[in-house]
């Protein structure tokens, strides 16, 4: 199990993919809980209210708030994994320091993406604190 310090937030507007991602997260991640969001709007609201977010796993294209707007405001508050089959996810990941995970993904790819997101976020925090 991969230890997550805080709450894991998972967002996807496709119920089947959301449920699959939640099942994988519950088998591979250990955090203080899981919050599920079915739209960009609910993800935005949750991130604005949750103070202990340890990891965000989110689809790129969802109704409500655009992911780029969410990343612009919240990317420095938690590590992000963007799950999508849209190449735009790779661009946003690079721009905001998130990790891009192409759908469909295997459990090992999911675990690697989470580890990479946690590592990249930790490095960003060290760099930010030294400036």
Image (tube, rainbow, N blue to C red):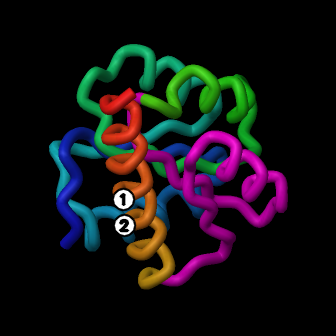
Residue 20 x %, y %:
48, 67
Residue 64: mark in rendering: none
Q: How many labels, in total?
A: 2
Residue 39 x %, y %:
62, 34
At 32% from the left and 41% from the top, the residue drawn is: 126
Residue 119: mark in rendering: 1
Q: Residue lying farthest right?
A: 87
The one nearer the camera, 49 or 80, is 80
* Residue 63 picture quarter: top right
In this image, 46 relative to 122: left or right?
right
Residue at the disc numbered 2? 115
In this image, 70 relative to 68: left or right?
left
At 37% from the left and 50% from the top, the residue drawn is: 123
Residue 20 appears anywhere in the view:
yes
Kindly report which numbered mark, 1 or 2, lies closer to the viewer in this rendering.
1
Task: Tell me if label 1 and label 2 are in contact, CB under 8 Å.
Answer: yes
Q: Is residue 105 magenta?
A: yes
Residue 46 x %, y %:
43, 23
Q: Is residue 104 magenta?
A: yes
Residue 35 appears anywhere in the view:
no
At 63% from the left and 25% from the top, the residue drawn is: 72
The answer to whether residue 35 is above or below residue 1 is: above
The answer to whether residue 122 is above or below residue 113 is: above
Question: Which segment is the magenta one?
Answer: 77-106
Residue 42 x %, y %:
54, 25
Judging from the image, what secondary structure is the residue with disc 2 in?
helix
Judging from the image, what secondary structure is the residue with disc 1 in?
helix
């Amino acid at each position: 199990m991969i230890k997550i310090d805080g709450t894991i937030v998972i967002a996807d507007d496709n119920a089947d993919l959301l449920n699959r991602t939640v099942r994988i997260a519950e088998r591979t991640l250990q955090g203080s809980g899981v919050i599920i969001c079915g739209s960009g709007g609910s993800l935005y609201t949750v991130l604005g209210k949750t103070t202990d977010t340890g990891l965000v796993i989110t689809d790129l294209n969802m109704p409500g708030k655009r992911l780029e707007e969410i990343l612009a405001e919240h990317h420095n508050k938690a590590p992000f994994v963007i799950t999508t089959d849209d190449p735009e996810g790779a661009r946003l990941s690079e721009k905001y320091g998130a990790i891009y995970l192409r759908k469909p993904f295997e459990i090992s790819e999911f675990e690697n993406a989470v580890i990479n997101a946690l590592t990249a976020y930790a490095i960003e925090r060290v760099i930010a604190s030294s400036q």
